[in-house]
Each structure stands twice: as structure tokens, then as C-alpha cells.
Image (tube, grey):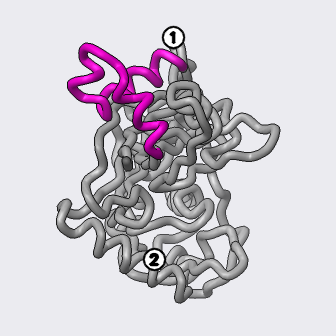
Amino acid sequence: MRIRLDIAYDGTHFRGWAKQPGLRTVQGTLEDALARIVGSEVHFVVAGRTDAGVHAAGQVAHVDLDDAQWARITSRHGRAAADPAGSIAHRMRGVLGSYPDATVHRSSAAPDGFDARFSAVWRRYRYRLADDVSGYDPARRLDTTSIRGELDVGAMDAAAQSLIGLHDFAAYCKAREEATTIRTLLDYSWHRDVDGTLVAEVRADAFCHSMVRALVGACAAVGEQKLDITDLVALRDALERTSAFKVLAARGLTLTEVGYPADGLLASRAEQTRARRDSE
């Protein structure tokens, strides 16, 4: 039985999503919670592996339960018996306790062909950046990066728009051996919210390591007038990692949503994505 899990977490005190020996991670915390319920080890497959300190409001994962594990879920009475897959999130929240920094909002039986990672068609991130216009808000210190000076949001937005499309983003990615840096940046924009905080919305088919934080750092440099709008395209097309701008802190970054095709297209999308990754 494949279960879809809709997940949120404050990444501040996690060493990222992926399980690592001896370290506290989101995957390890949530897998341990579900293992207590089903009586044995489980393994989550996630839509996007977030780095240490990165948050999520709309993360998605799936888990495959064997017959014995599923029997532990369906043996419950009352509300759980009517919707055993849906009861998993409620039971995990009970194990995680009050005010946890990771939770499962919803659990459901996954549609045929669903793969949290390979069926996804896009991921959306938000980045919050405070400058002298918005000021520093202590209540938002864990999800907002601060920078001195007043940034030009119009120039930042224009710079962001110039990067949209299918490109090699090697200049904006931390290199990983044998991993492609070609991505389709679907949307990228900057605006100020009602409190004056600078907010970036970034959506792509997938992101390579540290790509979003590099993209926002580059636009921040434009907002500070340290770089011109045209510089960002030139740097991108040079295809080399650069020190012309700072990669901004993880605290300002949140994975907000993962997009999937209609149920009938989930399996074919997963097959296409796997085939492309295998050829890279």
C-alpha cells in the first residue's frame, strides 16, 4: 500500500531532509514516528531534499507499507477503520507530540502510478528577505534573512525575469559529480509584502543543490547595485560557479508547493523523469 504524505517543518534545528547517521533530520524524525505505529522500519521517498535550515510548508513524500504494516493500520476501530490511510497523519501527530518542528498535515492512499519524486512536474519555493525598508522582526528571525541597506525591488524583479527559461544553471548550483545543472526555471519574481519584506517566488521543474539561494543572492546583489541586471545572464551563460554574489542563508527559504499532473498521467511522468535522470 503506497501512502502519500503532505508534510511541513521548521528546518532550523534539522540537518536537512535526508537521513544521516548520528544527525537529526526530517526524514529520520518522521520515519521513526511512523515506524512506532506500524511496528517496523519504513522508508520515505520525498519530492525534494531540502538542505539544513530550509523549511517546508508543502513538502510531499510517499511510503510503501507491506502487508504486516498495513494490517497494523487497518486493525484500528472507529474513525481510523473508516479511513485507515487518512488516519496515519493523525496518529503520527500523536507520536510527534505537542508543538513539534515537523508534522504530517495529511495522509492518503496514493493514486496508481504516483511517485512523490519522479511524478512531480514542478517545485515552488519562497524566500523572505528583510532590508532597511521592512526592518528586523524578531518574531520572523527563523524564516527571514536580513540584509543592510535599502534594496531596489524593481531591479531585482527585472533581473529575476531575465533568468526564466530552460538553461544550464551551473553558475548558480553547487557542483555534484555526474549531476546535471540544466533546469527549466518556470517563474521567478520579487515583490514586497504588506510589511515591506522582500519576497521571492521561484518555480522550476527541479532545482540543483543550493540553486534557489544562489538565485536570490544574485538578485539581492542587483538590488544593492553591486551587479547590473545584465550581469546575471552573463554569469549564467559563463557556466562557471562564481563569487560575484553571495549565496544567501537557508533560514529565508521555504518549499511551499509541489505540482503533479492529473492522476492518469502520474505513471508516465514518473517513467519519463527516471529515463531522463538515468541518461544524465
Determine whether the residue tagged by mark 1 lies in a helix, strand or loop. Answer: loop
Quarter of the view holding residue 274: bottom left
Q: Is residue 170 above or below residue 29?
A: below
Q: Main secondary structure of the magenta part?
A: helix
Q: Is residue 76 left or right of residue 247?
A: left
- Which kind of residue does numbered mark 2 sit on? Arg
* Residue receiving disc 1: 98
Q: Is residue 250 above or below residue 263?
A: above
Residue found at the very far right of the displayed protein: 22
* Observer-nearest of 29 and 17: 29
| Residue 148 rendering spot, x and y as whole percentages | 61, 40
Quarter of the view holding residue 221: bottom right
- Which kind of residue does numbered mark 1 sit on? Ser
Residue 168 appearing in the image? yes
* Residue receiving disc 2: 274
| For discs 1 and 2, the disc positioned in front in the rendered view | 2
Residue found at the very far top of the displayed protein: 98
| Residue 30 rendering spot, x and y as whole percentages | 56, 34
Residue range highlighted in magenta = 66-95
Task: Give the residue at x 25% y 14%.
Answer: 78
| Residue 220 rendering spot, x and y as whole percentages | 54, 55
Task: Give the residue at x 57% y 56%.
Answer: 213
